[in-house]
Image (tube, helix red, strand yellow):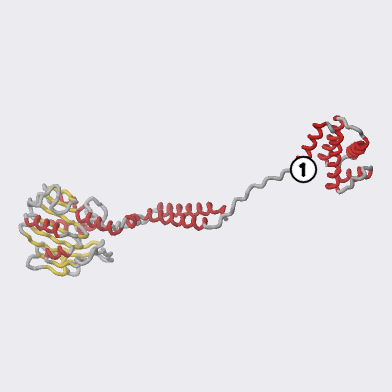
Amino acid sequence: MKRYTPYILIFFVVSAFIILLATGVTTPKKKLDERITLRHADKKPYGTYVAYNLLKSTFPGAEVFTSKYEPGYWENASDKDKDQLLMIITDKFDVDRFEMNNLIEFAENGNDVFISTVYMSSYADEVFRCNSSSGDLNYIAPTDLKKNYRFYLKNPPFDHRRVFTYPGRTFSSFFSETDSATTDILGNDASERVNFIRLQTGKGQVFLHLEPLSFSNYFLLNKDNAEFYSNVMSLIRPGIRKVIWDEYYLNKRAANNKRKKGWMSVLMQYPAFRAALITAIITLILFVLFEMRRKQRIIPVMTKPANDSLDFVKTIGRLYYEKGDHKNLCKKMAAYFSEHVRNKYKLPTTKLDAEFIKNLHYKSGVPETEIEGITDFISYLDGATAISQSQLKDFYKQLESFYKKA
């Protein structure tokens, strides 16, 4: 099982890769990008690219720029000047006391402030003397409506009551209470609840609108909804010299969300990263499970046993040969021959007669003449006084020939 582990792991990794590749290559059905950004540079359905670029034609001659700084600290504008417009389009107007004081001072000096948001802080409700339905919530989630979202602009101040619709997402927020002494009601939602008001302060005015998605690209490009934008902007005082498109509160909300979510939750929003992380975890788990099995020790390579007896015989033979004791060496060779015949062919070697030669011929297949030459020399050894070197060599050759043929 151990040897198949790498192949199993490779199979799972390749399978996961093929699945990811297949799901990534497949062209999904086109779907509306429902991410709500409200940023002026975003051409996504719920960005505000169209609304921002319409400012130049709506206020010809006015300088239009964006700002990411808190109110009163703009780079190209001053709260001491007049005839300026501050546009704040955000889903969360989380203003504090210091920022609110700067906004009120900016408006009192003869400037307009237009705020379109779904959420206003409780302090903003207190200053504007109103009560928004989302004042006690951290965030209002947009809803998907099966039918078109609908809201109205009132008459007056508009020439006639206008109805605007679109099939996109919406925030359900409204003013449950307003101060009639200081507030003009400008619009309602489909349930006749107030969602658009104006307040006078000093020489300027503040507009509060609770449906920021009506400034999105999706809304303004739907049918003739661009008329909504021109109607609303017609309420701004004439002679505007500067328009400040504020994104400070968008960045403030994003920073707060990042602190709440943490880096891991942000990364897990990306499907590719999430799929890769899951694949890596599954692969690691499989690897650990297979490695938990008890490992077998490596089986050592077994070498063929050496024939020590044969080496010993060769050593002794060389010893006798070097001493010149040829007769003794021949006797040793004859004894080894007899031992070999007894062990291998099970023949007695007490009598090396004709019957022995015949039986050994049948069992070994060696010609009788060769066997007879060996037995004759062995019989000759018993009565010989000495053996010459040439006789030793001839006897050795006879035995080698027998061993090879037998």
Looking at the rendering, in which quadrant would you find the C terminus?
Answer: top right
- Residue 218 locus on image (x, y percent): 24, 57
- Residue 204 visible in the picture: yes
Kindly identify the amino acid type of the residue bearing the numbered disc 1. Answer: Ser
Task: Specify few, some or many for label 1: CA neighbours under 10 Å numbering under 14, 14-19, or 20 or more.
Answer: few
Residue at 21% in and 60% down: 92
Per the image, label 1 sits on a secondary structure element best described as: helix
Q: Nearer the viewer, residue 59 or 18?
A: 18
Looking at the rendering, in which quadrant would you find the N terminus?
Answer: bottom right
Q: Is residue 29 above or below residue 391?
A: below
Q: Is residue 352 above or below residue 318?
A: below
Q: Quadrant of residue 219?
A: bottom left
For label 1, the residue is 309
Q: Quadrant of residue 169?
A: bottom left
Q: Residue furthest front?
A: 323
Residue at 20% in and 56% down: 249
- Residue 60 locus on image (x, y percent): 12, 48
- Residue 253 locus on image (x, y percent): 23, 57
- Residue 234 visible in the picture: no
Q: Is residue 28 above or below residue 313?
A: below
